[in-house]
Each structure stands twice: as C-alpha cells, then as structure tokens.
Amino acid sequence: MSERTLMDGNRATAEGAIAGGCRYFFGYPITPQSHIPERMSLRLPEVGGVYLQAESEVAAINMCYGAAACGAKVMTTSSSPGISLMQEGISYMYGAELPCVIVNMVRGGPGLGNIAAAQSDYWLSTRGGGHGDGQMITFAPWSIQEVYDLTYESFDIALKYRAPVSLLGDAILAQMMEPVQERKPLDAALSQTDWGIGGERHGREKNVITSIYIQPRALEELNHRLYARYAQAAREETRWAELGAEDPEILVCAYGIAARICQTGLELAAAAGVKARLLRPISLFPFPTAPIREWSEKVRKILVVELSMGQFVEDVRLAVEGRCPVEFSGHTGGVVHTPEEVAGVLGNL
Amino acid sequence: MPKNLKQLSQSEVRLTAGHRLCPGCAEPIAVRQVLMGTDDPVVVVSATGCTEVSTTIFPYTAWAVPWLHIAFENAGAAVSGVEAMYKAHLSRAAKGQPLPDYVSADKPYKFVAFAGDGGTYDIGLQSLSGAAERGHQFLYVCLNNEAYMNTGVQRSGATIMGTHTTTSPAGRVSQGKRVNRKDLTEIMAAHDIPYVAQSSTARWRDLVSKSEKAFAIDGPSFINCLTPCPLGWIYDSGVTVEIAQLASDTCVWPLYEVLDGQYKLTYRPKEKKPIEEYLQIQGRFRHLFKGEEGAEMRKMMQEWVDWKWAQLLKKCGQEV
C-alpha cells in the first residue's frame, strides 16, 4: 500500500485540484474554507500556477469566467454567503458554456447564519447557478478521500460538459482530517479546446464566448444544447453508493456528512434488529433517480436524513413518485444528527 | 468646545466591556473614542468583521446603542437606508404628521458605520462610494488592521507591500505581499465629501476630535483609523498603542484630515523615524530582516513612505 497523507478537507480540495490540473485559482476569504485559498496561495506558485485573491466573491467568479474562456482549468471556493454572491457569474458561465469548478463548504443559513455544518445549499447548487434555465452538475463527497477524488475529477468533467461543476462540502468536511491517497497529476496545460479564446487564431475560425442571444430561437437553442448535455451527464456521471442490509425494510437516503452519520446510525439500528440500507447519492445533479425508484418498490418506507429543512428530500420524492412513504428527519442551522438519533428514528418507523 | 479628558471619561459608554475581541485589539479602543465624539443618540451599522462578530455573540451584545449588522459588502448601503428612513420621518413630521415613538423629535440622530479594511477597501468600496456620492448624513469608520483578521489573516487591499499574510506568504520566492495598498483615504477625499480623515488609536485626542468634527458635519464623513492587531501583526499585546504611534512616527500612517477640500496635517513627528523601527517589532515583517531580498524590500518600502509623505506635505502646504 502506498503512502497516504493526513489532511483536512480544505487541504484535500487544494491538493486534489492541483493534481487534477488546476493552475488558476481565484478566491476570497470566508470561514470555514479560508484554508483553501491559503493553501493555494502557497502551492500554486510552486507548480507554476496563479493564485489571485479577489476583492469580493463577485470578482472571484468573474476572474474564473475570464480564465475559463481561455480553456483553462480554473477553480474558486467559498462558503454559502459567498456562493450567494457568485450566482450572477455562475449563470453567465453556464450561459457562455464555460467550465469551472466551484467548491462550496456549506455553512448554516439563511443570512449570516453561522459557521457550522449544514446542507441547506442543496437547491442553490442543484437548481442554480443564479437566474435562467440551467442547472449545475453537483457532487457531494462524504469523506476527505472523496473530497480529494471528486475535486481531482471535476475539472475534466467540467471541460467535458463545458459547464460549471459544483462540489458541496460542509464545515465538518472542510476541517475534519483523514488519510488521503493522492493521485497521479493530470494534464495542467491550457486545454487544447477548439472553443477557447486568446491570442492568435492561426487561421482558425473566430471563437465567440457569450451568453447573449437576442433572438429567442437562438436562446432556446442554447437551452436545448445545455439540456442535451445534462441528459448525457445523467447517463454518464450519475453516481451513488449503497451499504447495509441486502433485504431492507427501510431505505435511508442521505448524502455527504449526513450519510456518514447514517452509516453508524444504521449499524446501531441493525444491532437492534432494524433491517435498513443506506443509499448515498454522490452526484446530486444528475440525481440517482433510477436506483431510488427501484428500491421504493421493494421497501416499506424510505427515510431521508438531511441537514436542512428538507431540500434533498424533494428529489427523493420525485424519484419515488408515491410508490412508498418517504419520511424526513432534518436538522438545520448547524445542528447535526447523532448516530443514536438516526437509529432511534429508524427504530420508530 | 472640545471635551477634556475628565469629561470624556464621564461620557456615556456605548460599547461595553464583555465583548470577545482579543486582548490588545485596537478596534474597541477606536469604536469607543469615535463614539465619544458626539452626545447625540447614535445608530451603528456594522459590516461583517472582527468587531461585528466579537461584540455580538448571540444572544449577547456589547452595544448599548441601536445596532444593525449587514453582510460584508453593504455597510455603506445599509447606513444609507437607515438614514433615508430617518430623514423621511423628519420630513413627514415637518408636514405635521406624527413621528413613530422610536424617533425623538428633539434629538438629532447620528448614523455611524463601522467596517474593517476588507469590508471597506475591497468588497464594500462600491456601497461606500455610492453612499458618499448620494450625500447621506453619516460617518463611516474603517477599522483598518490591514488584513482579513476575522477569517485568519488573509491579505487585503489595505495590506502594505512586504507583509506576510496567510494568502501572501513569505518564503523562498516571495517577500510577502508584492503590491502596495491602495490609498483609500485619498479615494474618499476624491469624492469631495465634507470631511475625510486618517487617524489611529495611538493619539486619543486626534481620533476623538476628528470624530467630533465628523459628527458635526451635515453630510457624509469618513475616518480611516489604523487599528493594530496583535494576532495578525504578531507582536506583544501590551504595545498596541506604541505600534500605532510608531506607524505615524515613521510616516507609514500619517495623521491628517481633509475638511471641505483643505488638507491639514494633524500630527507631524519631530523626527521622522526610519521604517525599520516600525517593521522590526512586528512578526509579519520578520522575513524582511533576512537576506538581500528582505533588505531590498525594506528599501522599496522606505522609498514608498518617503514619496507618499512628500506628496502629503505638499497637499497640506507644509515644507518637506
């Protein structure tokens, strides 16, 4: 077994990005993710990259727009209120079909909220990127290794779909430490895209990066193009993992750190004779609709555990379409379930 | 007539003890001295930052005055809104309509915004500029500790060149922040608002009297107050006042004001000290005393200080 490195989620994000070929990082301080820009400011000069601290999150996302337009692997990271400020830029990026990796170490909201762990940006990420008819490919890691891996892989996925890709972490994943197996560095050169701008054209056709389509038909065409890509992503990027009873009575759906808590909750419940299985979406958009639908025909009930007032649960209900009851257990504002609490809820279903 | 020290010591405490700012932090000193500048009722607006966070750990508050928090970039906008609401009440009252019971007709309210340098030099500059241009009656105080201290000492637009921060780390290839700070006080003076000043927590008379002038003005006013930070600047927490004094004695942070366009130096050191005296007692500049690159950076910093100081003296009509 090769050597692993102990690191927190913030550092894993930075190292995963650099190994994934990211050389352009634009950031702004906000708790609990300021260690990502700090790490990038130290590491990027070492690998010939560029770290720039923006004067605001609005500036950071638009710096990403500029660099992404040249076909580069770019990233910004923030936490919930900062991601709110980036919404306009994100909308422009998917409108202009620009790849970018956006990491959100989610904290409690709304408003100033607090700096504790939450999952209340599910809608913001999966429905968002600001105004308009688009959605954002969103991944949700549950371990520090997965934070590293998903960050590492997201740059190529963003380039493949010419779209922003979001990672949802949280205040716990940002700061908790686990051993990480680092991966082989990917190509960091400016990608040889045929759509990027910058410098000489060398006889090729003019490339245009824009999100303005005055003619309604042309804008409709753009949206169809985006949705064709989402359909492709649904086929090729949908990820989930399952564990627990092979013949469950109850299916538990949770993602990210909530799924991690449920893992122990399920073990406690199993000891008390509850037959439950955990289905954990790793991609939130595209959503693993098919496996959830499949299980909904076999189990007595589905329990959704989520650190919000109930956002992710809506996608589960859309997948289930009434085939079985979907119960919900949520905490919000930085309150986190204990495994015992999850086991208790399971025992009472 | 300015108040004497005894009168000031008896003035109403508007930011009470029990807040959770670090020992040696200059920000509560600045807030208290600024608010000594008026006996009128005040409404305070705070942008996100050390002072905001540490004085209002919910459900507690150290503020004995009406206080509003607003997100990082919006202190100028929020204070505009509060002031506009107040003015609207007064103009309705002038037409004979009753005032709401929370607005006193006989006491003129004063509106103050406190924000850090990140919230002012960087993300909040747009909303401050807008408020100044619209001409609201408010005092905006930048509590300037030259970096984002609340989130762990990241560089800001106020950080001077050569400074080590967590996002401008000093090391083999870097001598800390490569570019210099922008001159925010001059940016605000360029708005042609009635009163703009630069002060610090080293000289209480300077800061209190500048606040008195600012509060007396009908229109926007701005004070850029240097507030040393033991944690981010890396020095013993007992010498906060001395560090601020050295900032002015070396002319890294000159104290001056611009009243109706007229520049006036409010403190001229008897002898302008070399910048080294200011740098060597702070850990954030430690790297500048190792090797040739550090010496080169110190030389550049001294040249910058000399250049800015000469410019300022000229504006103030003083001999260089």
Image (cartoon, coloured by chain):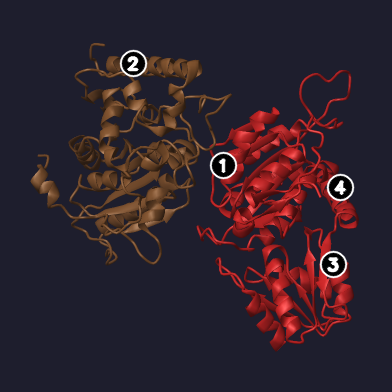
Chain colours: A red, B brown
Q: Which badge, 3 or 4, is on the more N-terminal residue? A: 4
Q: Is mark 1 on a helix, strand or loop?
A: loop
Image x and y of residue A245, in percent: 83, 78
Q: Which badge, 3 or 1, is on the more N-terminal residue? A: 1
Image x and y of residue B230, in percent: 36, 41
Q: What element carries label 2?
A: helix
Same chain for mark 4 and mark 2? The answer is no
- From what the image shows, is residue B310 above or below residue A145? above
Judge the density around disc 2: few (<14), some (14-19), many (≥20) Cα neighbours within 10 Å: few
Viewed as shown, does residue B137 lie left or right of A170? left
Residue placed at 78% from the left, 32% from the top?
A188
Quarter of the figure with the C terminus of chain B: top left
Real-space Cα separation, disc 1 to disc 2, in angstroms: 33 Å
Instruction: Give the residue pinned by disc 2.
Output: B311
Instruction: Give the residue pinned by disc 4.
Output: A225
Residue placed at 39% from the left, 48% from the top?
B80
Real-space Cα separation, disc 4 to disc 2, in angstroms: 58 Å
**What amino acid type is highlighted by mark number 1?**
Tyr
Instruction: Give the residue pinned by disc 1.
Output: A28
| Labels 3, 4: front one | 3
**What amino acid type is highlighted by mark number 4?**
Arg
Judge the density around disc 4: few (<14), some (14-19), many (≥20) Cα neighbours within 10 Å: few
Contact flag, marks 3 and 1 (Cβ < 8 Å):
no
Q: Which mark is residue A289?
A: 3
Contact flag, marks 3 and 4 (Cβ < 8 Å):
no
**What amino acid type is highlighted by mark number 2?**
Gln
